[in-house]
Image (cartoon, grey):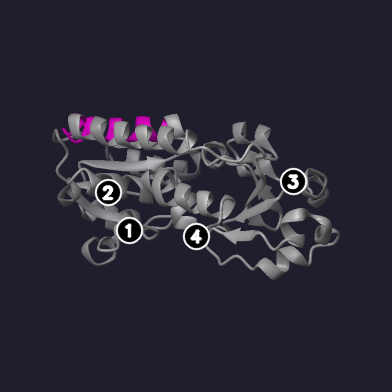
Amino acid sequence: MRQYPPRRIVCLTEETVETLYLLGEQDRIVGVSGYAVRPPRVRREKPRVSAFISADIPKILALEPDLVLAFSDLQAGIVADLVRAGVAIHVFNQRDIAGILAMIRTLGALVGAAERADQLATGYDQRLANIASTPRPAKKPKVYFEEWDDPLISGIGWVSELIAIAGGEDVLPKLRFQQAARDRIILPDVVRAAAPDVILASWCGKKVVPDKIRKRPGWSEIPAVAHDRIVEIKSPLILQPGPAALTDGLDAIVKALWPV
């Protein structure tokens, strides 16, 4: 980095934006992903410089960032272009709750706010433990999480863990260890056989249509469909591995599994 702590940061994904705001370090942000919506004020305060797998490289370079924050191999192309241009990059790759907490602490250290970041992460850890210890009925609802509808993609590490913390049972738990979406593609009959009590759906970038789920051949037999327990969780709350998933995302799962 040209400066420590970095004074000019570009965030190519939403979760680092939210974390910097929570740490009170938002003034360092000079550019954000077009998907950044938390907190709501970010949409009017920060220029948008990227989608998820594409970015306006000249616009980023014009901002003269000391540091760019990216996520996973999906942004490798953007990262390569920026590295060639001499920009300092940190690429996160958190895929589970432990990784999310580590991301928060690492980002805090990068901006000189390690103590505040540790407090923030510790608070989330305690909150998760409290929710996990909440007394629930002995019978756990079986849960199918759908990240995409065509083809069907399920499983995503931190969501599977959050389902367990909320008191549910992920019907496809082994998929949580598959990082790539292509490795989490499943056949409709797999869901039918699993017979989930609840279907949670979050189709990245588009609205969930429960009627499309109900009309899938043979799915009327699935308990979640028969009892109308198909619940959409907005993608900004659950599909970004950051603070939102540990708070509003988890709360939405709890509400879906244990309606009042």
Residue at image location 40% in from the left, 40% down from the top: 80
The amino acid sitting under disc 4 is Lys
Question: Observer-nearest residue: 181 or 198?
Answer: 198
Q: Residue at point 79% right, 48% down?
A: 187
The quadrant where residue 93 appears: top left
- Apparent side of residue 59 relative to residue 133 in the rendered image (left or right): left
Q: Nearer the viewer, mark 2 or mark 3?
A: 3
Asked whether the residues under the numbered discs 1 and 2 touch, taking CB atoms below 8 Å apart as contact, a structural biologist would say: yes
Residue at numbered disc 4? 234
Residue bearing mark 1: 49
- For the residues labelled 4 and 1, the Cα–Cα distance comes to 23 Å
Disc number at residue 186?
3
Q: Can see residue 53?
A: no
Mark 4 vs mark 2: give the one in front.
4
Magenta segment includes 112: yes
For the record, the magenta segment spans 99-114
The residue positioned 61% from the left and 56% from the top of the image is 201
Residue carrying label 2: 10
Q: Are marks 3 and 1 in contact (CB under 8 Å)?
A: no
Earlier residue among tags 1 and 2: 2
Q: Secondary structure at mark 1?
A: strand
Q: CA distance from mark 4 to mark 2?
A: 25 Å
